[in-house]
Image (cartoon, helix red, strand yellow):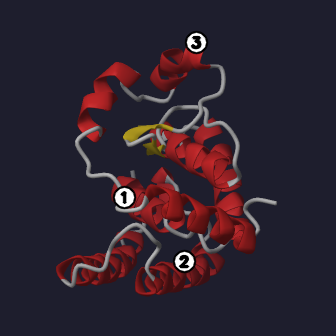
Amino acid sequence: MTYDEEWATGLKLLIQREQYIRDALEKRGILEDAYHPELKKVQTENAIKFKAMLEQRGFPVLSNAGEEGVRLSWLIILHAVSLPDFMRTCLDQMRMAAAQDDYPRDLLAYTEDKICYLEGREQIFGTHFDWAGGELKPTPIEDEKFLDERRKGVGLPPMAEILPRVTHLPPPKDPARRLAELDAWLKELGWRV
C-alpha cells in the first residue's frame, strides 16, 4: 500500500507536544480531576493545526496515511473535545471510510462512544469509563445485552476482559465537584443542553 508518510511525521510532532505538556503537568502535581487549561490549550491548538492538514490533504485513512498516520490523527480527534463540530465532522468521515474498510473499526467505536458520552447519550461499544459511586465503570450502555456482539464486530475484546485493566486507576479527589464542573463545561461548549 502506498501512502503519504508525511501524515505520521507531522502528527507525531503534535502528539509529542501534547505528551510533553501532560507530563509537565503531572510532574507539577496539577493534572488532576479538572480539564487543565494548559492541556485544553495544546489539544485545541493541535486540532486547529490538524484541520489545516485536512484542508490540504483530505481526511487521513489507511490508504493515504497508513496505520500510524490514522492512529495519530485519531488521538488528536479524540482529544479535540473543545471543538464539538470538528469532532462530529471527523466522526462522519470515519464512518464513511470504515464502510469502505479504509479506517480501523475499533477507532471508530472509541470515537462513537466518546461523542455519545459528551452529548449525554448511552454509548454503543462500552469503551468509555467514568467514576460513579467511587468505582470506575463504563458509562451507560445502549442495549447492553448485545454489547459483546457489537464489540466483536469492531474488533474489540469482550467487556469481561477489559474491566480488570481499568479498575485499578485512582478515583478523582472530589467526584461531585468534578462531575459538576464537567457538566457545566460540556454545556458551555455546546455538547449538552
| Number of residues whose C-alpha sits closer than 10 Å to that of mark 2, classed few (under 14), some (14–19) or many (20 or more) | many
Residue 103 percent coordinates (x, y): 52, 46
Q: Which of labels 3 and 2 is toward the front?
A: 3
Q: Which of labels 2 and 1 is toward the front?
A: 1
Side (left or right) of 14 relative to 119:
left
Residue 156 percent coordinates (x, y): 40, 29
The correct choice, above or below, for 167 with respect to 32 in the image is above
Q: CA distance from mark 2 to mark 1?
A: 27 Å
Q: CA distance from mark 1 to mark 3?
A: 30 Å
Whether pointer 3 and pointer 2 mark residues with C-beta atoms closer than 8 Å, the reply is: no
Residue 172 disc label? 1
Depth order, front residue of 67/126: 126
Q: Residue at x 58, y 74 (%)?
A: 57
Q: Amino acid at mark 3?
A: Lys
Q: Which residue lies under the disc numbered 3?
A: 145
Which quadrant of the structure image shows residue 122?
Answer: top right
Q: Amino acid at mark 1?
A: Pro
Side (left or right) of 188 relative to 68:
right
Q: Residue at x 25, y 30 (%)?
A: 164
The correct choice, above or below, for 183 with respect to 41 in the image is above
Q: Residue at x 38, y 41 (%)?
A: 136
Q: Which residue lies under the disc numbered 2?
A: 47
Q: Amino acid at mark 2?
A: Ala
